[in-house]
Amino acid sequence: MSVQEETFHGFANPVDPSPAELRAWAYQPDSVPLTSMPPDWDLLVAGDHLVQTLFDLAMDPACPARRFALHCLYIYAADGIRTNFRAHPKRRFRKLVEQAERAGDELMRNWAHNSRVLLARPDLFAYRDWCEGGLVRENRRL
């Protein structure tokens, strides 16, 4: 039985979910609605500990929480770039961008493109786009 087929019973600690918990939730997001999560949960989970899981979920077109995972990747990218990679390792960020360019669909290629644009032009950062989901909702390139 895969993680996607198992029943998700909730997070042991929603402020610090494990990769397995996040993955299980992402395939059954109605089991614990986002509205019941702590404030700014997206900001809490968009860190190094969960970035590979978020990336894998965002790469899966069949994942019901794919847009949430992609939204978290936008937060992760902006956080890394805006802190000059004090918040997140530049090497990990570049690997994710390259993988999205190589193997991603349009949503993921747009994330990679937008991340590269922001890397080159940090002045293009807009909180609404990067941290409030604007670029995910609009699926547009900078």
Image: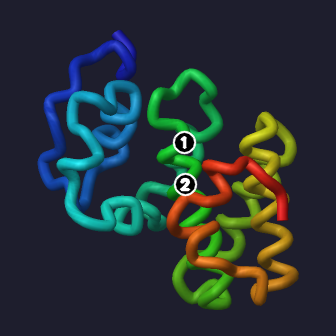
Please name the amino acid that badge 2 sits on: His
Residue visible at 79% across and 51% down? 110
User: Judging from the image, what secondary structure is the residue with disc 2 in?
Assistant: helix
Q: Position of residue 68 (x, y in %)?
A: 48, 46
Q: Position of residue 80 (x, y in %)?
A: 61, 78
Relative to 103, residue 6 above or below: above
Label count reads: 2
Judge the density around disc 1: few (<14), some (14-19), many (≥20) Cα neighbours within 10 Å.
Answer: some
Please name the amino acid that badge 1 sits on: Arg
Q: Where is residue 22 in the image (x, y as percent from the top left)?
A: 34, 42
Q: Position of residue 17 (x, y in %)?
A: 26, 52
The label number, if any, that marks residue 71 in the structure image: 2
Placement of the N terminus among the 4 image quadrants: top left
Closer-to-camera residue (123/47): 123
Residue visible at 55% across and 67% down? 75
Left or right: 49 with respect to 74?
Answer: left
User: Judging from the image, what secondary structure is the residue with disc 1 in?
Assistant: helix
The quadrant in which residue 41 appears is: bottom left
Left or right: 10 with respect to 46?
Answer: left
Residue visible at 17% across and 44% down? 11
Q: Distance between the residues labelled 2 and 1?
A: 6 Å
The quadrant in which residue 134 appears is: bottom right
Left or right: 54 with respect to 121?
Answer: left
Judge the density around disc 2: few (<14), some (14-19), many (≥20) Cα neighbours within 10 Å.
Answer: many
The colour style of the image is: rainbow
Marks 2 and 1 close (CB-CB < 8 Å): yes
The label number, if any, that marks residue 130 in the structure image: none
Question: Mark 1 sits on what residue?
Answer: 67
Placement of the C terminus among the 4 image quadrants: bottom right
Relative to 47, residue 108 above or below: above
Residue visible at 73% across and 45% down? 108
